[in-house]
């Protein structure tokens, strides 16, 4: 006998209402239709009040169980340390010996500058500027300052670690700083106008050797630039760490100006990309300036006067009297 569908549904509803709670009804339907019951949600699993196991030994930043700090500080994970302190680099001031008696040229190609020492120890310079004619700007010209005669240099002054000299010439007063094997002309900022020579010429920039003479030393200049870059970074970091909060911003602005000025000056030096002479000397000058502000400038005079440690001499070897050796003679 086949029961009608309405009778079956009535029986199912009657049995379902007899079970209290939503969970019981769900279980009834699962058993009725052969479904596998779903696992209970994680929140319904009873948690036992058991303490968490201690972390395994050797976990970085977590002290082992039962460890008590000797200083009395509360336990906890190790805090990351702050930025590493700067390691300032001491620098040696360049001397004039590397430029005496040598022909230096602006950017390695223009003009001529030669510095010599007199018998009394004073310095004098002969300088020729290369530029364009005032009357005909399309034509080149050259002007010998001081009529081509040696011009005495002023007494050196320390421009933050570098030796600075001046040439007192009314038409073109020049001031330059001595770097290793070259000079950096810092003044005048504008082009010099020499009326008697009908010439207008620039003097500002790096006066150094001819590029052909320094190309074999390109590897040396690359290493020097790398060392100078590291010295600039460390000395700049140390200077900002020691400075007052209101003095940090000018130091940062000066460092940014140094990078742009180096790019502007050295891109004009002949074949700079092949030897890096200008970048090396310009960066070394900056490192010397920062070292002077930090009080880490080494003076060449002090180094020369410092007594050098002497190695102990070995005692003289006394020559023993010669004796004839007889292998068959026993005492």
Image (tube, rainbow, N blue to C red):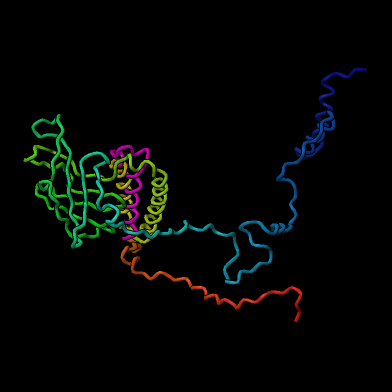
Q: In front here: 172 or 9?
A: 172
Give the camera-side residue of 291 and 122.
122
Q: In percent of the image, x 84 and y 23: which residue is there? A: 8
Seen in the picture, residue 196 relative to 120 is either above or below; the reply is above
Numbered-mark total: 0
Q: Residue 312 appears at what percent x and percent y?
A: 48, 73
Please, is residue 48 above or below residue 321 in the view?
A: above
Q: Is residue 165 visible?
A: yes
- In the image, residue 300 lies in the stretch drawn in magenta: no
What stretch of residues is rendered in magenta? 266-292
* Quadrant position of residue 64: bottom right
**Residue 10 x/y as whole percent:** 82, 26
In this rendering, position of residue 140 left or right of residue 301: left
Residue 37 placement, left or right of 111? right
The residue lying at 75 percent from left, 82 percent from top is 331
Residue 42 at x, y percent in the picture: 72, 44
User: Can the viewer see residue 244 in this picture?
Assistant: no
Q: Quadrant of the N terminus?
A: top right
Residue 87, picture quadrant: bottom left
- The question of residue 284 being in magenta is answered with yes
At x 25%, y 57%, the residue is 163
Determine the residue positioned at 65% across, 77% down: 323
Q: Nearer the viewer, residue 200 or 68?
A: 200
């Amino acid at each position: 006998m086949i029961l009608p569908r309405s009778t079956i549904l009535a029986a199912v509803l009657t049995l379902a209402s007899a079970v209290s709670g939503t969970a019981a009804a769900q279980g009834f339907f699962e058993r009725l239709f052969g479904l596998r019951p779903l696992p209970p949600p994680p929140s319904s699993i009873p948690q036992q009040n058991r303490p968490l196991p201690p972390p395994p030994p050797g976990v970085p930043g977590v002290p082992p169980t039962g460890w008590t700090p000797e200083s009395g500080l509360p336990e906890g994970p190790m805090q990351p340390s702050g930025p590493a302190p700067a390691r300032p680099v001491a620098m040696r001031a360049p001397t004039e010996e590397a430029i005496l008696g040598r022909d230096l040229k602006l950017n390695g190609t223009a003009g001529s500058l030669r510095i010599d020492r007199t018998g009394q120890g004073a310095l004098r310079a002969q300088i020729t500027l290369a530029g364009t004619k005032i009357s005909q700007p399309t034509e080149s010209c050259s002007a010998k300052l001081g009529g081509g005669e040696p011009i005495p240099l002023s007494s050196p002054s320390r421009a933050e670690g570098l030796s600075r000299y001046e040439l007192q010439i009314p038409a073109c007063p020049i001031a330059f700083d001595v770097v290793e094997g070259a000079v950096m002309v810092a003044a005048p900022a504008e082009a010099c106008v020499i009326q008697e020579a009908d010439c207008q010429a620039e003097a500002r920039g790096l006066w150094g050797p001819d590029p052909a003479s320094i190309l074999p030393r390109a590897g040396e200049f690359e290493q020097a630039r790398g060392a100078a870059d590291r010295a600039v970074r460390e000395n700049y970091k140390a200077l900002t760490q020691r400075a007052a909060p209101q003095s940090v911003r000018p130091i940062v602005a000066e460092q940014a100006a140094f990078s742009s000025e180096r790019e502007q000056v050295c891109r004009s030096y002949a074949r700079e990309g092949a030897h890096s002479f200008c970048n090396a000397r310009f960066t070394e000058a900056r490192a010397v300036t920062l070292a002077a502000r930090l009080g880490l400038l080494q003076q060449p005079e002090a180094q020369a006067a410092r007594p050098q440690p002497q190695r102990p001499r070995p005692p003289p070897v006394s020559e023993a009297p010669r004796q004839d050796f007889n292998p068959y003679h026993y005492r």
